[in-house]
Image: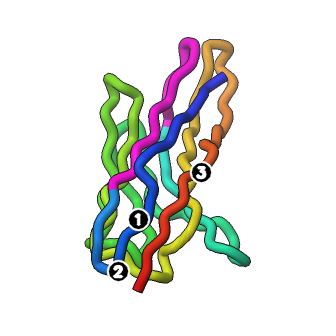
Amino acid sequence: QVQLVESGGGSVQAGGSLRLSCAASGSRFRVNAMGWYRQAPGKQRELVAKITSGGTTTYADSVKGRFTISKDNAKNTMYLEMNSLKPEETAVYYCNVDATDRLLRREAYWGQGTQVTVSS
């Protein structure tokens, strides 16, 4: 089992910046990939950015050039640096981790979500 703790959400004005963190913990697991998703009211959850264990990154087109995903392997922690935020990016941001446990079971885990509010 993997536990995820997110932090860093909050309120910011349009054009501002926020940094989200997601720390993964548990017993003897290997992270395959980590990612950030967001869900705005009345909309489907969407991928924002993803990073593999090898460091390959993927971004939604709408955030390319403004958001940066990174990770600290030693701490099993992932970050999302968000710059030039827009009001339409107001949403609950969720951490997702694709991990394999000691019994070689691969599973996706979700954080509890952190609210990001961007005011105009």
Residue sitting at 53 percent across and 35 percent down? 5
> How much space separates mark 3 and mark 1, taking CA atoms?
19 Å
Quarter of the image where one finds residue 110: top right
Amino acid type of disc 3? Gly
Which residue, as the protein is rendered here, is positioned at the far right?
Answer: 42
Relative side of 89 to 113, left or right: left
User: Residue under circle 1?
Assistant: 59
Q: Which residues are magenta?
A: 19-32
Image spot of residue 18 (x, y percent): 33, 60
Mark 2–mark 1 contact, CB under 8 Å? no
Q: Looking at the picture, which amino acid does disc 2 mark?
A: Ala
User: Measured along the vertical axis of the image, is residue 96 above or below residue 100?
Assistant: below
Label 2 neighbourhood size at 10 Å, few (<14), some (14-19), many (20+)? some
Report which residue position mark 2 lands on.
Answer: 14
Q: Is residue 116 above or below residue 40?
A: above
**Magenta region includes residue 110:** no
In the foreground, 74 or 22:
22
Q: Nearer the viewer, mark 3 or mark 1?
A: 3
Mark 3 highlights which residue?
113
